[in-house]
Image (cartoon, helix red, strand yellow):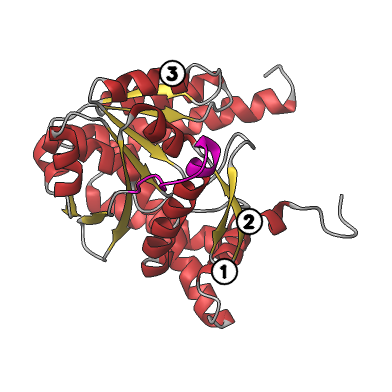
Amino acid sequence: MSGTGSDIRERLTDGLYGLGWGAVKRLPEPVATRLFRTLADQVWKRRGTSVLRLESNLARVVPDADPARLAALSRAGMRSYMRYWSESFRLPAWSPQRIRTSVDVQDLHRLTEGLDAGRGVVLALPHLGNWDLAGAWVTTELGVPFTTVAERLKPESLYDRFVAYREGLGMEVLPHSGGAAFGTLARRLRSGGLVCLVADRDLSASGVEVSFFGDTARMPTGPALLALQTGALLLPATLWYDGTPVMRARVHPPVTPPGTGDRAEKASAMTQALADAFATGIAEHPEDWHMLQRLWLSDLEPREGTP
């Protein structure tokens, strides 16, 4: 095999994801469930970088947790994360009825009434539960198409796999980079459409600082700016598992612009309100928060003696 080490790793990663979507969905469900739970436990026992980062993040969410409690939370977190992947690999083979009965949404009226009003809705979520399953439920149960964005992955073929997968679930997917996504999202909202964005981690380094579990993090202003520019309703939503085959969801009260301030100040205040809603859902179900990356600014800053 020719190519650089990076090229080889990228092709290997793409091949593994292709194998997952091709093979896992054909496994009997109990077999797939056991396989991914075993994989989660093995990854957790290795105590690699992702597991340690997850545990560090959870320590902020549950600050009074002792080491044993944190270890139990991170193990449950890896099982939840692998449940996300097992479901995602299998979703293309699920029947519409299976999708409809796999999600239970509290306060759904906030979303449906917003859509019925024709003003457009921005639904903003953290990395909780399975946002792909939630999206498939929206397009299947509600019959509502929506637009989202996806981070560009390497290799390009892997990004194409994710786009094809999500489009197969009824989503319109735009690339996060390139600069054209915001304008397209605004047009969808002005026509009364639905935009769904995972918004608890800033991918552009242009987000605003928010207070999050007692420390400063940076989150994207896109959801707030879209709502301000188009007049769309901005709704936070959170997802979680409760030990059953059904994923639970909640649509939180709308985030409204403050009465004073310029556009940037209003967007900042609305993003803080989103962060507060996300924190409520994460604190209630910390094991379902799939944040395996650095998030808080104090974790992103170089430490003394490190490069």
Up-down relation of residue 3 to residue 169 (above or below): above
Q: What residue type is labelled 1?
A: Arg
How many callouts does the rendering have? 3
Which residue is at a point 71% across and 16% down the rendered structure image? 2
Which residue in the structure is indicated by mark 2?
296
User: Considering only order in the chain, which callout, 3 or 2, is on the residue closer to the N terminus?
Assistant: 3
155 or 288: which is nearer to us?
A: 288
Mark 2–mark 1 Cα distance, whole angstroms, equals 10 Å
In front: label 1 or label 3: 3
Over which residues does the magenta segment extend? 255-267
The residue at the far front in this view is 260
The residue at 26%/66% (across/down) is: 243
Q: Are marks 2 and 3 in contact (CB under 8 Å)?
A: no
The residue nearer to you, when weighing 20 against 294, is 294
Check disc 3 and report its element: helix, strand or loop.
helix
Q: Which residue is denoted by mark 3 in the rendering?
A: 183
Describe the element under mark 2 as helix, strand or loop.
loop
Disc 1: which residue: 60
Three-letter amino acid code at the position of disc 2: Trp
Tell me the SS state at disc 1: helix
Mark closer to the chain start, 2 or 1:
1
Can I make out residue 94 in this image? yes
Q: Position of residue 94 (x, y in %)?
A: 18, 37
Disc on the earlier residue, 1 or 3: 1
Q: With 152 as the anchor, is 117 left or right in this view?
A: left
| Mark pair 2, 3: CA separation | 29 Å
Tell me whether circle 2 and circle 1 mark residues in contact (CB < 8 Å). Answer: yes
Location of the N terminus (image quadrant)? top right
Crowding at dot 3, Cα within 10 Å, few <14 / some 14-19 / many 20+, comes out as few
The residue under label 3 is which amino acid type? Gly
